[in-house]
Image (cartoon, rainbow, N blue to C red):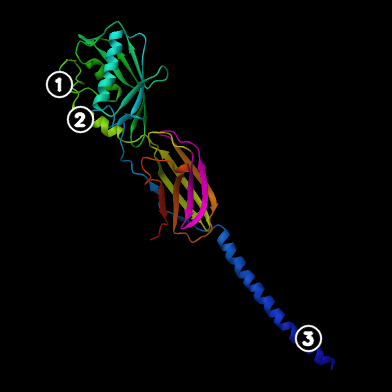
Amino acid sequence: MVKSVYVEEEEHKRPFVYVLLVFLLVSLIISMFLLYELLPQGTETFNRYELSKNFSSFNESKHGQFYSDMRFSDSLISYHIDSDCSDIRYNDMIGAFNFLENQTIVRFYEISLNSQIAVHCSNSAKIEGKMIIAGEGGPNYVVQTDHYNIIINGSILLLRDSNCPRPNIAIHELLHVFGFDHSNVSSSILYPTSRCEQQLSQDIIDTIDNLYSVESLPDLYFSEAYANKSGRYLNLDVEIKNSGLRDAKPFDMYVYADAEFVEKFSFENIGVGEGRILRVNNLKMPISNVKKIIFFIDEKNNTKEIDKSNNKVTLNIEVSS
């Protein structure tokens, strides 16, 4: 009898032992899988993105300008005429601003400090060789971006009164501030020697209108992006620039692994022509078998830009041959 009871107890324990063994086996498999997912593995690389440099350059002149695509950041431009200018030269300069307003889409307004165009005068004529210089004008400070050479400020030194019905000398120097070089066409108002019959050519008018038809906005874009991964850990190297006409306000950049959200990074203002570099190592992803990494710029409050099509970059996993 005692032996029979002992056998029944052993048979009763067997299902529990089987369940325990199955549980341990499943736990071991899961642990091995997690260990495989979390531990560093062989490095896999995504294709590098680098924006082709096909924009304007300081070394290229276009439309008769000193450099390609020179313009102020906005079509509304401030000026100040110094007190050393006589009434005649003051009126000549006002006439030049009014003339350019009537011919193009740019507009001007007068302020006393920190103007974009500063006008000065002198009673002494400047002589170079045998020619009396009527005036001098041009940009003082230019910021190069991938789209424009942005004129931050410029100055005019008006040395002679105009003897023409139209203030050609002042107009000539004002156009220099807008980035236009001398013309070799004698009938052009930009010809080195001033005559009353000279005119503002239509190509200059069209160039100004085309340049300033673009709204004064920022333009964030990815100039470079690189990533590689080891298991579920991502290393990334991203450069974001602002090639627009205004400073870019604070914004966020989102990172996705395939369709899975990985991380959000916040950036402060980026000035015109400036950039920011983000380097991150061992960023944990929700999955390991990733085929593509997506970077996406999201402006807060849906800020307008010149071009939003360059706010997203996709890097695909490189397939070894």
Q: Is residue 140 above or below residue 15?
A: above
Name the residue type under label 2. Asp
Assign a secondary structure to mark 2.
helix
The span from disc 3 to disc 2 (Cα, nearest Å) is 104 Å
Name the residue type under label 3. Glu
From this viewpoint, is residue 252 visible? yes
Residue 71, position in %: x, y? 32, 29
Q: Which residues are magenta?
A: 250-274
Q: Is residue 33 magenta?
A: no
For residue 79, side relative to residue 34 (left or right): left
- Residue receiving disc 1: 187
Number of other residues with Cα within 10 Å of mark 3, as a class: few under 14, some 14 to 19, many 20 or more: few
Residue occupying the far top of the picture = 124
- Asked whether disc 3 touches disc 2, contact meaning CB atoms under 8 Å apart, the reply is no
Q: Which mark is residue 9?
A: 3
The quadrant the N terminus occupies is bottom right
